[in-house]
């Protein structure tokens, strides 16, 4: 029998772990007795401008807390992002500028609200710069809560230490800073991926040191990218962004290996097709479900039709963006055209040409097609890869 909605068993039904055992139900009971909602926390460091489906797994779980009347506290880590989360890293993260972090933070919040309910009673958005810009005295108090030996127990730190790879003091402070977020906002429960387990549990230790009730911890599975292997990450290019176009979402989902489909259906809470459905149709159902979540059911059907028109019937899409091409002496430098039209570097454009990944009016081009007659380009359809098209116009 399925657990009742609103219980810890129901909230943890598709989580990897609920720690400590019985902790979430105790916090639910305590909150109910006090006549208040739980405060469920998630921290996101704005190290990139986009949220992808990997983030959506945890955000969807937070939405379940909201749907039960609990209050989600979304921490925008504008201060912790200046350190860079070392989780899963084999080297120190590069530093971002304050301007980049602030711009990314605005983007993160807007995109998270595509999944979370934007209701002041159910959502609280905080920036950890509000409390982490602390005095040295406060920092000393925080640092006293944890030993270096504890921090070096982290798998990523332990591996780097054993390999004599550098670990900055600032990185050692990161778990403490994340933990202090839980102190500052009185978190009842904190959510994160399994790669965050150490940080989430350290939050309990630091809360206890500051005489606060200890949060329960809910860890969610890590969604693999469209390669079906590595954790979804923009830096690996295996991601699908929540703001991607419907056509892009649909097409990129279809590149997912068959063996990863079941995990995607489960983690993204997309209703699977009936038993016996073949892999091709199951994957199309998954793609429609993802597009429908972020763009609506009509957009999902339109994206499927557009995909079939281009990749099954081998037709040009109905709607194409024009790209104006500047020419000199009646000729155009094709790597520059590709770079300008699709946002690639010129070296990447030359690589794509050499791989046969560029077509002009359906004809594959090669590494020798560098400078071409302008008359050949005017009105022609330039295609890069399987899904990217531009109508070229001279002038």
Image (spheres, grey):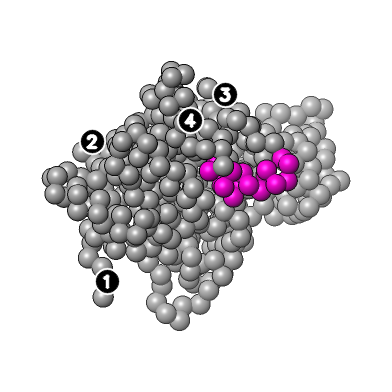
Q: How would you classify the magenta stretch by its main secondary structure?
A: helix
Residue at which label 3 appears: 97
Magenta stretch: give its range.
150-165
| C-alpha gap between disc 3 and disc 1 | 48 Å
**Image spot of residue 205 (x, y percent):** 40, 42
Residue 308 among those drawn in magenta: no
The dot on residue 194 is none
Kindly identify which residue carries mark 4: 143
Tell me if residue 153 is in the magenta stretch.
Answer: yes
The one nearer the camera, 65 or 209, is: 209
What quarter of the picture does the N terminus occupy? Answer: bottom left
- Are the two marked residues, 3 and 1, in contact with CB atoms closer than 8 angstroms? no
Task: Assess whether mark 1 and mark 2 are in contact (beta carbons under 8 angstroms).
Answer: no
Tag 1 residue: 2
The earlier-in-sequence mark between 4 and 3 is: 3
**Which quadrant: the C terminus?**
top right
> In the shown orientation, is residue 136 left or right of residue 8?
right
The residue carrying mark 2 is 120
- Tell me the residue at 41%/59% (across/down): 17
Compare marks 4 and 2 and give the one earlier in the sequence: 2
């Amino acid at each position: 029998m399925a657990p009742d909605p609103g219980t810890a068993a129901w909230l943890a039904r598709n989580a990897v772990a609920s720690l400590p055992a019985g902790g979430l139900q105790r916090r639910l009971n305590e909150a109910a007795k006090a006549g208040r909602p739980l405060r469920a926390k998630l921290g996101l460091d704005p190290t990139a401008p986009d949220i992808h489906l990997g983030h959506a797994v945890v955000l969807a779980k937070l939405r379940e807390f909201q749907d039960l009347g609990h209050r989600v506290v979304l921490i925008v880590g504008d201060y912790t992002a200046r350190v860079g989360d070392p989780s899963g890293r084999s080297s120190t993260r590069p530093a971002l500028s304050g301007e980049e972090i602030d711009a990314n933070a605005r983007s993160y919040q807007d995109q998270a609200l595509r999944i979370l309910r934007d209701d002041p009673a159910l959502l609280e958005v905080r920036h950890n710069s509000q409390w982490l810009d602390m005095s040295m005295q406060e920092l000393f108090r925080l640092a006293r809560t944890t030993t270096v030996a504890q921090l070096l127990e982290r798998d990523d730190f332990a591996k780097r230490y054993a390999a004599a790879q550098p670990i900055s003091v600032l990185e050692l402070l990161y778990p403490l800073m994340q933990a202090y977020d839980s102190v500052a906002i009185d978190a009842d429960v904190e959510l994160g991926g399994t790669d965050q387990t150490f940080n989430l549990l350290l939050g309990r230790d630091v809360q206890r040191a500051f005489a606060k009730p200890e949060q329960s911890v809910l860890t969610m599975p890590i969604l693999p990218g469209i390669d079906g292997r590595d954790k979804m990450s923009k830096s690996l290019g295996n991601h699908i962004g929540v703001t991607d176009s419907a056509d892009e979402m649909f097409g990129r989902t279809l590149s997912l290996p068959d063996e990863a489909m079941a995990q995607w259906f489960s983690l993204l809470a997309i209703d699977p097709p009936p038993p016996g459905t073949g892999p091709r149709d199951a994957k199309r159902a998954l793609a429609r479900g993802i597009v429908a979540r972020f763009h609506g059911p009509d957009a999902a059907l339109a994206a499927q039709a557009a995909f079939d028109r281009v990749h099954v019937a081998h037709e040009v899409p109905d709607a194409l963006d024009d790209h104006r091409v500047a020419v000199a002496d009646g000729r155009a430098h094709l790597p520059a055209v590709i770079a300008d039209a699709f946002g690639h570097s010129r070296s990447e454009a030359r690589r794509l040409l050499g791989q046969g990944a560029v077509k002009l009016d359906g004809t594959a081009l090669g590494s020798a097609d560098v400078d071409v007659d302008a008359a050949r380009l005017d009105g022609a359809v330039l295609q890069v890869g399987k899904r990217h098209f531009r109508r070229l116009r001279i002038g």
